[in-house]
Image (tube, coloured by chain):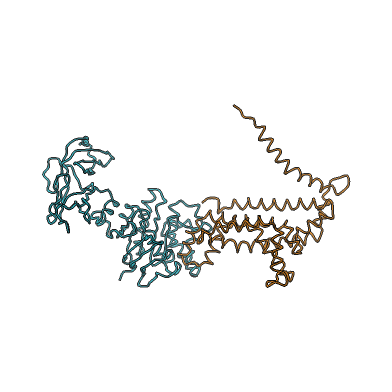
Amino acid sequence: MKQSRFGPWLAIAIGTLYFVLPLVATFEFSLRLRRGEYSFDAYAIVLGDPRFQASFLYSTVQAVATIIVGALLIVPTAYFIRLRLPRLRPIVEFITLLPLVIPAIVIVFGYLRLYNSSSWIPLTATTRTSDLLLTFSYVVLALPYMYRAVDTGLRAIDVRTLTEAAENLGAGWTTIMFKVIFPNVKVAILSGAFLTFAIVIGEFTMASLLDRPAFGPYLQLIGANRAYEPSALAIIAFIVTWACMGLIQLFGRGPATAKR
Amino acid sequence: MAFLEIKNLRKAYGANNVVENFNLAVEQGEFVSFLGPSGCGKTTTLRMVAGFEIPTAGNILINGKDVTNLRPNQRNVGMVFQAYALFPNMTVAENVAFGLKVAKRPAAEVKARVAEMLALIKLPQMGARYPYQLSGGQQQRVALARALAIKPQVLLLDEPLSALDAKIRVSLREEIRNVQRSLGITTIYVTHDQEEALSMSDRIVVMSEGRMEQVGAPFEIYNYPRTRFVASFVGTLNIMRGKVVDGAAGRIEIDGQQIATARAIPAAQPGQIRSVALRPEAVTLKNGVDATGNLMRGAIEEVHFLGSVVRIRVRFKEHAIWLDTFNNPSAPPPQRGQPVTVHFGREDLLVLEGAEPG
């Protein structure tokens, strides 16, 4: 008996409309700056705005810093947990999930209480240290994605045997970590890195409450004062995110993972 | 003094002893195999020599130096793993060069040594390939080259052939042995494959439940197993329980028939129950020819035609034994139920250590 395919197609159509229609509408709206005709004027204004360039650059630098600090913190942690402390894994996994459960605003208020200018570690005292605090905040925010990506990467290689092989050949921990472990979880780190990048570029709460000139607060500012430019910015943010996803796919098919 | 000495080695996890009272002296250039079933402690012992496990008690000395408390990267011991353990991010040449680069050897020396090692394993053109581009056998040869490149004092091989198919296993074990002989490197080889151990080793350590059951040359282990475990683990063996008639004369009674060993049965009292062992290839069917040695009467119970060999089971009363004969196209195998007399030499009958309950 031939089964009807109407139901599945209907579900796909509804799903597609749900996700695509607002996007198409936003895109269409972003082109309406010039009365009576479509144009990319809103994009030209946004891309030509020095505040856009400055805030995007700031967030990009923050994202890169977050990725470096996150990788240096998470790869060795996930590695040692897998190698030496496998019993701690459920606890660490739970901890890494906390940023998804605790709202960013709660976390940032916690930071402000702990690291304010009259505290023992006054990270909010200067703009430089505030930048650092924001980087660390983003590391925490990206923890669930980065940890999972790295842990999956470590699961794909025989960490214990590779470590023992390297140790047996005279390697110390630093050599093992940077010559053996990091290169073999490169694809996983990249996956985590692109997700981190996408999160950091659009993040608002932490940057706003720490009063840093990031892309998220700029998005909010433009959204509150202009009509068409926010739509153009939303589309730009989508393109950045999709580019990140595409890069994950691209690097995920790297030669080292092609055959094992 | 032996090159590698293992003294009173013990490893325990909580109350569970996985290796106990392990003593072994290995001469320079010797090839020693640890043979035993899974969980007998052979890999744990090897890993203690490599430094990956810390002994609960005992000492390990290499060339007179106590290495028991040294880290694995300070021992200069080469190891080949069951799972190859090649670094997937590095080419074959980079894998082989890894240990030398870690030791900060000059680039020219590294290059020359890598070329020498790749030639040794007969893969001189494969330096630029990645591990995933090689077959399992090739990967294991690269792992061997990598372990040897650092000129280790001792080479350790942990079931290196068990992940390979049968044909590659045979050719690679010959290759490993040739390389080991040509370099004269002291080697410990862990395996559960008796054929591998018998064909490659200068000496075999048979292990069971963390203990050494017997140490000896392959010929000795196969032909003169000292314990019931060694007898049953190494090769096919017929084991029967008999009642001692005269220990001094080596006479023993099995299923109402008296047979004798070539030597006296040590510390045996008349009436005591002892186990005797007999290799299938040591037993022949007596075809009316006068023979010296032991004769036992029974009946054919099973006949398995295996091609070049015919394996026959002869039942006496309680006991039955297998015997192997070569296939003879002009004489068809005997029929089931046919009464026969089997013959075996007195020196072929081994009395295993220890009395058994009656």
Look at the image and tell me whether residue B323 can be seen.
Answer: no
Q: Quadrant of the N terminus of chain A?
A: top right
B15 or A160, which lies in front? B15
Q: In the image as oriented, which residue stretches furthest toward the top? A: A1
Colour assigned to chain B in the rendering is: cyan
Which chain shows up in orange?
A
Q: In the image as oriented, which residue stretches furthest toward the left? A: B290
**Side of A207 relative to A251 (left or right):** right
- The residue located at (28%, 40%) in the rendering is B307
Residue B67 placement: quadrant: bottom left
Q: Position of residue A223 (x, y in %)?
A: 81, 54
B203 or B37, which lies in front? B37
A159 or B123, which lies in front? A159
Look at the image and tell me whether residue B342 can be seen.
Answer: yes
- The residue located at (76%, 64%) in the rendering is A211
**Side of A28 relative to A257 (left or right):** right
Q: Position of residue B98 (x, y in %)?
A: 49, 64
| Above/below status of B150 relative to B261 | below
B64 or B103, which lies in front? B64
- The residue located at (23%, 42%) in the rendering is B326
Q: Position of residue A247 (x, y in %)?
A: 65, 52
Q: Position of residue B334 (x, y in %)?
A: 21, 36
| Above/below status of B326 relative to B222 | above
Number of callouts in the render? 0
| Above/below status of B137 relative to A174 | above
**Side of A150 relative to A197 (left or right):** left
